[in-house]
Image (tube, grey):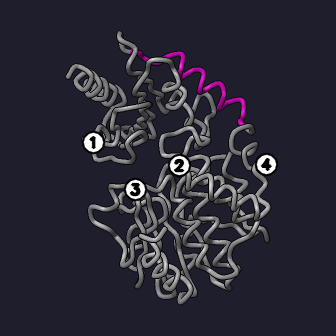
Amino acid sequence: MSKHLETAQNLKDKLLEAENILLFPHIGIDGDAVGSCCALIWALRKKGKNAYALYEEDMPGNLMFLTDDPEGKPCFTSDRDIISDEDLDVAMAVDCGELKRFPAYRDKFLGAPVKLVLDHHGTSLKEPLGDFNMIDPDAAAAGVLMYWLLSLIEGAVTDRYIGQCLFSAIVTDTGRFQYSNTNRECWEIMSELSSWGCDFVRASTELYESKREEQVRITAYAINKMTVSEDGRWAVTTLSKEELDAMGVRAGETDEIVGEMRSVKGVEVSVFLREVENNVIRVSYRSKYFVDVASLASKHGGGGHLRAAGATLYMSLAEAERIILDDLKNYFSN
């Protein structure tokens, strides 16, 4: 934490000086972004601040239990005028640090008099967006950095709801503490959250054992149609918008597919392509031991972590699949 103490202090000072604060998580939202945002929003509201997270897409169903604060007030909104441009004091990007990660609200962010970033993606270090940036690619999750930031806000922590949010952030981005980014710091934070009264069982049940039937069926369908290389080292599958719509799939219900493919014995890299709309394809990459999938994603304007990354391709699903297959064939032939 010592290397972040000064920056965390700066973020804390700017947040507490402000009255009206908006958070900007990334599109394709996940548990780390939702948990981190909700933890900070409740902490700021406890200090009398007016705080919301702006988000333009549907919220994954397994994260909905986090999105209202303990008083029942929503943490997330798509209303860009919930705080007017004139009244906005601070804009803060959370779990992301590039404008393309929240395109619908980029002008709202840029118009804020003070801009902050809290993120753990290395790509955010290239051209930091904020006036103050707390960016650490070695942190297991944005939730880890959020824990340290909140620890500086007197009277904001040791709260069961905040603990539940931070647990959800960290447990999802570490793959239930199975990914290589899991470290001693994660366990130390979990111990602290336990002392706050965090209900790990309820949070885990909501995150992982509250799936709709449609989610289970689409996962099985996608796995059944996956392509595996002859040597078994990579696997790819795709889902068209037509397939997703036909099965009634909601936001976030395909997130586990790429991890399920990686779980196959011998598979080092798995890639899942999902058609969001015509000529817009979201690509999710995962690797097991040695492949830097962030470098594969960066070829297409994406990025992320060594073992988990993503990109968006603006072309047909068939063309995107061909390009990804060529990437994998070329990588493993070298």
In the displayed structure, 311 sits above or below 151; it is above
Q: Which mark is residue 137?
A: 3
Label located before the other in sequence (1 or 2): 2
Work out whether residue 220 or residue 40 is closer to the camera in this orientation and state it. 40
Give the label on residue 183, or none. Answer: 2
User: Which label lies toward us, 2 or 3?
Assistant: 2
Tag on residue 300?
A: 1
The answer for how far apart the CA atoms under marks 3 and 1 are is 20 Å
Pick whichever of labels 2 and 3 is earlier in the sequence: 3
Image mark for residue 221: none
Q: Position of residue 254 (x, y in %)?
A: 56, 35
Q: Which residues are magenta?
A: 211-228
Identify the main secondary structure in magenta: helix
The residue positioned 32% from the left and 68% from the top of the image is 128
The crowd level at tag 4 (other Cα within 10 Å; few <14, some 14-19, many 20+) is: few
Element at label 1: loop
Q: Amino acid at mark 1?
A: His
Q: How many C-alpha atoms fall within 10 Å of the one at disc 1: few (<14), some, or many (≥20)?
A: some
Q: CA distance from mark 1 to mark 4?
A: 38 Å
Residue position marked by numbered label 4 in the rendering: 202
Q: Is residue 186 above or below residue 227?
A: below
Q: Amino acid at mark 3?
A: Pro
Q: Which residue is at the front of the view, 20 or 129?
A: 129
User: Residue shown at 44%/18% (left/top)?
Assistant: 266
